[in-house]
Image (cartoon, grey):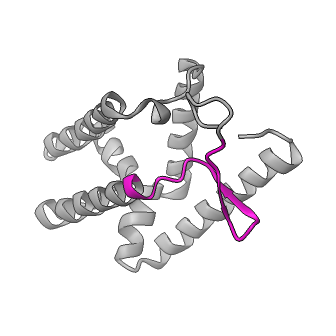
Amino acid sequence: MRAGVPGRDNRHTFQGFLHVANFTPMSALIGGALIGISATLLLWLNGRIAGISGIMHGVLQRRGDDAAWRWLFLAGLVAGAGVWLWLAPPAFAPRAGYSLPLVLLAGVLVGFGTAQGGGCTSGHGVCGISRLSVRSIVATLAFLVTGMASVFVVRHLLGVAS
């Protein structure tokens, strides 16, 4: 159901079998273009790949030679998310009920996963595939298959609805 509009179902049906909730092609297109532009500019201007886990790892390692651009990149991510939350219509606002400990635990698990996977979805999926890196293509396929399997288990085997 759509947030703020009781009784209204906003799922879109494709060929009668696939349901997509909150399908927003324009914001997805704009967001994807901004990600692509920022990744391209970082590579052209700095010679660096825009993998968020790698950028964060560099900040945590306290490298003095390239800390400034890393901090600015991370600040831009936070500022961009803040602007989106401030300007987003109520239907797109995050759901109430998120707990800070759960969000922090999720962040730690994602950090662990990126360390095990040798990078994150942004580094492999956006930057690696665009450079035709076989390692990144395999990693991205693993991310996708694992995500699909997780959704299947949670929704169909455990019966938890979205």
On screen, residue 57 versus residue 109, left or right, reads left
Residue 14 higher or lower than 56, as above or below: below
- When the figure is inspected, residue 70 is found, relative to residue 83, above or below; the finding is below
Which quarter of the image is occupied by the C terminus? Answer: top right
Q: 112 or 52, which is in the foreground? A: 52
Q: Nearer the viewer, residue 129 or 30?
A: 30
Identify whether 29 is placed above or below 137: above
142 relative to 41 in the view: left or right: right
Q: How many marks?
A: 0
22 is within the stretch colored magenta: yes
Which percent across, then down, holds residue 43? Answer: 20, 65
Q: Residue at x 29, y 44 (%)?
A: 58
Up the image or down, 59 lies above or below 143; here it is above
Q: Is residue 41 left or right of residue 39?
A: left
* Position of the N terminus by quadrant: top right
- Could you tell me which residue is drawn at 50 percent across and 49 percent down? 115
Q: Is residue 15 magenta?
A: yes
Q: Position of residue 41 (x, y in %)?
A: 17, 62
Residue 78, position as x, y percentages in the image:
30, 34
Percent coordinates x, y for residue 51 in the rendering: 36, 55
**The magenta segment:** 9-27
Q: Residue at x 56, y 52 (%)?
A: 116
Residue at (54, 66) in percent of width and height: 139
Q: Quadrant of residue 68?
A: top left
